[in-house]
Amino acid sequence: MSDKQVDTNIEKIGRYNVLKKIGDGGMGSVFLAIDPKIHRKVAIKLFKIDKIRQDKEALKRFYLEAEAIGKLTHPNIVTIFDIQDEKDEPYLVMEYLEGQTLSSIINQKKELSIPLIVEIAIQLCDALSYAHSNGVIHRDIKPGNIILLANNNVKLTDFGIAKFQSLADSPQVTKTGIIVGTPSYMSPEQISGNPIDHRSDIFSLAVVIWELLTGKRAFDADSIATIAFKVVFEDLPPPDKYNPNVPKELSRVIMKALAKKLDKRYSNVEEFRADLENLRNVDYTLQFKSIELSKRAWYSKPINIAIIIFILIIIFGVVYYFNWQNEEYKFEERSGEVLLVDYIEQAHSLMQSNKINEAIEVLRKAEALSPKNINIKKRLAIAEEKKGDYDKAINVYYQLVKDFPVELAYVLRIADRWYQNDKIEKTEQLLTRMKEIIPDNKEVNDFLSKIEKARKEKENEMMAQQLELKRKKLGEASKTNKIESSNEKETSKPITDIDRGKGLFGYINIRCYPSAEIFIDKRSIGKCPVINYKLPIGKHSVMLKGPGNQIYEKNIFIFSNKLEEIYYSFESYGKIFIQCGDKNYKVYIDNGYVGLTPYYSDKIKSGKHTIIIERIDGQRETKYIFVKPNTMETVQCTFH
């Protein structure tokens, strides 16, 4: 008997050749099949015709799933290829995923390390962030809808009860009073029948991560009513209560995501991901292991109990002796992993109490334990900054980017904050150190140019103030007003020696991308570019009105016979698609990690970008692209 006949009598669904049935659900079945045109394995979700007759709303949810997933292209979301009808039975054709659902892993009590669980959570945050940004709320996050692949990447599936946030795209597929979802993983607001938003998915995801960390069912009871009561009114204990290997900071992050009240929960999934990201490089090596007590049955033998008691007596005697020799408890003698987490918590508490020097001392000890820890370096730099020692903070940021170049994006945000707080000199020093590591980075160089330009503008402003005082004394202000009316048709007129001889005018060049309408002193003078436009000496306001009503404004001072130049690029966006066959390689855009291949974004700033694709073995390929507004740029890697 062929494989096609092992599990089902169905041999073909549409053009697809069925290999076997791989799953059953209340509304249909899932089949493994082959697309004969391209010889690709696919998964086909076939809706049962008798269920269609019984439940019309379930059919609507089936089509809603197709619509929801069809809008989403993300490496952590299952890809839909097609939707068709077979003898009035609709079916979805999706990518075939070779892996295990998290529910299967939990039920089998398989070992998952804590770093892997954190990585799974971060990938799911990426998937939800993308879905939410496209107006889709999943509403059914649970272990059974999450597949862990062999390469430890995860895929989010089953958008059958997804909700569209925009009213125009939000079909009502449930009757009034009917709650759809899986009660044990619903948020309090969802199970209560109240309006929900993207924060409901955050709660559900946190429940899944809590279960992975503890190996226990979060909200378990004999009836749905009891489960609902627990979800709404009973708080879960922190995961480290059941699994002492879970760092307290990770427990704190999970418990915030599990907050019953919306205002206490993370306001968006990006915040949740950021806190998880900070824990990605924590140096803990202890792993979550599900070990049955039956495997330790030898403990119950009397002779072994006696041996254990004897050993414990010796251990306690040695500990007592050393404590007697040294009355102070040696905090540093505990295991490095536990000590590191305690150091971080201690530093956090000291920072909250504004004991900055003590916090820095603790963080230095933590850094000695784990010199390559990103989280500790960031905390240490912030502490030095709060202390006011910007030079030491700069040194820490320098070492951070030197060890982890992808953290440049984080340091640039710090630089922008310093700049906004008028720490211009320190901002320039920080960026100069960054340039030592990555000399050709466009963002760093542009930022330094911006600082230099601001410095010149400040100098010009001071000179302008001095000139203004002189003009008032000489009575020149009235002459300037008379000359303004003669300036309406001077666009693109070359500078002549006669003009220079007059000494009452200066000139301006204005270029912008894309083209924009120019207003000088609230009067339109045309569109960019404008070359050698003559203006009376003195202060003037310039406004550029770009695409999408974007506005750029700048006050300038025109000096006698001098040329002022303005160049401005308005924000415009294109699309990008990066693919490496069927491989999942890391993608960095302008030194910032953005996800795995195949990678797609429908909002990338137009202009030059540096693309880095990193294989699992660390080998990298660098490409330089130019994204044009409203166009798609496709990047194919050349790894063999």
Image: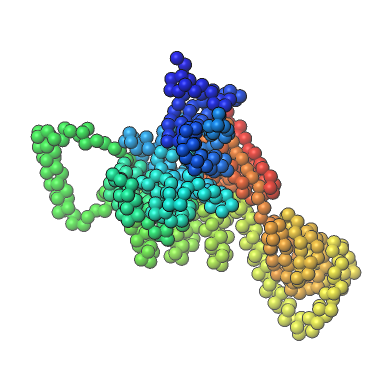
| Residue drawn at the location 49% of the way across and 27% of the way down | 32
Callout count: 0
Q: Quadrant of residue 541?
A: bottom right
- Residue positioned 71% across, 78% down in the render: 466
Identify whether 473 is placed above or below 497: below
**Which residue in the rendered view is the most extreme toward the front?**
53
Between 433 and 229, the one nearer to me in the picture: 229
Is residue 523 shown left or right of residue 319? right
Identify the colour scheme used.
rainbow
Which of the two residues, 518 or 437, is positioned nearer the viewer here? 518
Q: Residue drawn at (78%, 81%), measured in percent from left and top?
A: 477
- Residue 211 position, x and y percent, is 34, 44
Of 364 and 125, nearer the camera is 125
Farthest-out residue, right? 498
**Dividing the image into 4 quarters, which one contains the C terminus?**
top right
Q: In which quarter of the image is the N terminus?
A: top left
Which quadrant of the structure image shows residue 214? top left
Is there any visible trace of residue 76 in the rendered image? no
Give the percent coordinates (x, y) of residue 233.
32, 56
Please tell me which residue lies in front, 322 or 296: 296
Is 262 situated left or right of 303 in this image?
right
Q: Is residue 462 left or right of residue 245?
A: right
Is residue 623 found left or right of 126 in the rendered image? right
**Residue 232, position as x, y percentages in the image:** 35, 54
Q: Is residue 529 visible?
A: yes
Q: Where is residue 548 in the image (x, y as percent from the top left)?
A: 69, 58
Residue under the point 72% across and 62% down: 545
The residue lying furthest to the top in this view is 1
